[in-house]
Image (cartoon, helix red, strand yellow):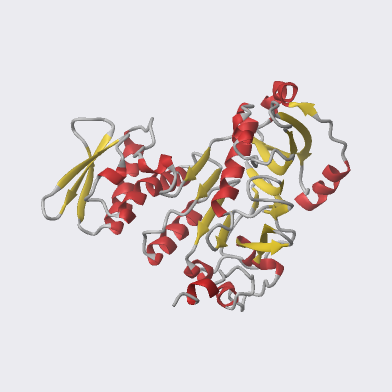
């Protein structure tokens, strides 16, 4: 599964917001290979989507929306849409274009789902949905098929009727790594159901990441007393046990950056073994060296398989110098329009796409208008 386009109106902090994850023309030279459906090379999508923005510009909210919408479509549970609505009870709408895949042939389908909400004061939420579906064949492109989608009539149904047809979607699980501000971050979990060889690989990745984050860690090994725990041995002889369900913030010996290593291990392992098709990595490097962030992102991108997609948020401008295509970079900003603040996005390729120009230099010169206003900080005397 891959996501191609998202439009939002009155959803969380987004109003009249549009972001596209496709690109029209094949690049002559790119660090990213196979940015297209594996069996339909003319159908292009962005495998890597790096979201850059100052604080409170909507990076984490955008990820929450993507995950909530996909979980709603997979389960039909209202709560995944309810959590996205503003408290002002205004109508909201979401339009998402995505591709599902049948593994046997393989066979691809382009979906457009429109979700509209209507909530009157003290009344039950009504969710109306339109679903359009097209088969993808060689030599189709998204730009070609989206014209057909635009011309197709969509019939709105209430969500109970609609979800009698939910088997139309070919979902795989989504892997999302959340920042430390989220409740799920603080509890250590690991991937279950691994055979002996896969466990060895998982342990190898865990060692590589944790020992890089804290060089004083001598070894990470499975606990002999529990199937759900790992023992961290330090060079000075100290040992700590991290068991599934532990609260990481209650383990004082672990540095803030090292605690992120558990989440990152799960994500890197999932990408390497293609356990999911969409991976979202949000604010995992606040306490981690920028060089380590660059190395881990490069590894994730290299491990991405066919028909997979990585979404990644960062404050690290060094990421902009890694040589990825301009179209991989998005810059969010919050702009005051009238009495409201509106989240806007610019893709780097909208301004420049020449190989001899660096998106880093453009960012440093604030050509994407995404730099924070520091005047109030400097006014402090």
Residue 275, horizontal then vertical, whole percent:
49, 39
**The one of 214 and 23 positioned closer to us in this rendering:** 214
- Can the viewer see residue 103 in this picture? no
Q: Where is 85 relative to 261, above or below?
A: above
Task: State the image quarter where residue 356 is shown.
Answer: bottom right
The residue sitting at 83% across, 43% down in the picture is 149
Residue 139, horizontal then vertical, whole percent:
78, 49
Q: Where is 335 relative to 60, above or below?
A: below
How many marks on residues? Answer: 0
Residue 263, horizontal then vertical, whole percent:
39, 46
The residue sitting at 68% across, 60% down in the picture is 344
Left or right of 115, for residue 298? left
Task: State the image quarter where residue 351 is shown.
Answer: bottom right
The residue sitting at 64% across, 74% down in the picture is 367
Task: State the image quarter where residue 266 is shown.
Answer: top left
**The one of 249 and 190 positioned closer to us in this rendering:** 249
The residue sitting at 88% across, 43% down in the picture is 151
Left or right of 380, for residue 127? right
Q: Which residue is farthest left?
A: 237
- Can the viewer see residue 303 in this picture? yes
**The one of 315 and 202 positioned closer to us in this rendering:** 315
What is the quadrant of the C terminus in the image?
bottom left
Residue 28, horizontal then vertical, whole percent:
67, 67
What is the quadrant of the N terminus in the image?
top right
């Amino acid at each position: 599964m891959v996501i191609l386009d998202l439009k939002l109106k009155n959803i969380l902090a987004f109003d009249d917001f549009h972001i596209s994850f496709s690109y029209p023309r094949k690049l002559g030279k790119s660090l990213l290979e196979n940015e297209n459906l594996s069996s339909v090379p003319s159908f292009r999508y962005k495998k890597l989507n790096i979201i850059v923005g100052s604080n409170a510009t909507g990076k984490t909210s955008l990820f929450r929306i993507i995950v909530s919408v996909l979980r709603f479509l997979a389960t039909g549970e209202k709560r995944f849409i309810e959590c996205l609505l503003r408290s002002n009870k205004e109508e909201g709408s979401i339009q998402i274009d995505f591709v599902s895949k049948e593994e046997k042939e393989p066979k691809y389908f382009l979906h457009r789902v429109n979700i509209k909400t209507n909530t009157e004061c003290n009344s039950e939420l009504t969710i109306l949905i339109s679903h359009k579906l097209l088969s993808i064949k060689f030599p189709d492109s998204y730009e070609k098929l989206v014209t057909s989608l635009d011309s197709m009539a969509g019939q709105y149904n209430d969500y109970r009727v609609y979800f009698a047809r939910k088997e139309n979607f070919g979902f795989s699980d989504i892997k999302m790594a959340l920042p430390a501000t989220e409740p799920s971050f603080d509890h250590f979990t690991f991937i279950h159901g691994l055979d002996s060889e896969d466990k060895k690989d998982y342990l190898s990745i865990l060692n590589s990441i944790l020992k890089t984050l804290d060089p004083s860690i001598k070894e990470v090994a499975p606990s002999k007393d529990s199937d759900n725990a790992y023992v961290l041995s330090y060079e000075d002889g100290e040992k700590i046990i991290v068991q599934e369900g532990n609260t990481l913030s209650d383990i004082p010996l672990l540095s803030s950056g090292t605690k992120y290593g558990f989440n990152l291990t799960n994500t890197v392992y999932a990408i390497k073994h293609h356990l999911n098709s969409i991976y979202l990595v949000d604010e995992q490097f606040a306490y981690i060296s920028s060089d380590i962030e660059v190395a881990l992102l490069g590894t994730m991108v290299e491990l991405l398989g066919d028909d997979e997609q990585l979404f990644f948020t960062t404050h690290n401008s060094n990421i902009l110098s890694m040589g990825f295509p301009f179209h991989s970079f998005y810059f969010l900003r919050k702009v005051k329009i009238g009495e409201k603040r509106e989240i806007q996005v610019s893709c780097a390729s909208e301004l420049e796409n020449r190989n001899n120009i660096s998106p880093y230099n453009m960012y440093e010169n604030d050509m994407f208008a995404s730099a924070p206003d520091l005047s109030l900080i400097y006014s402090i005397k």
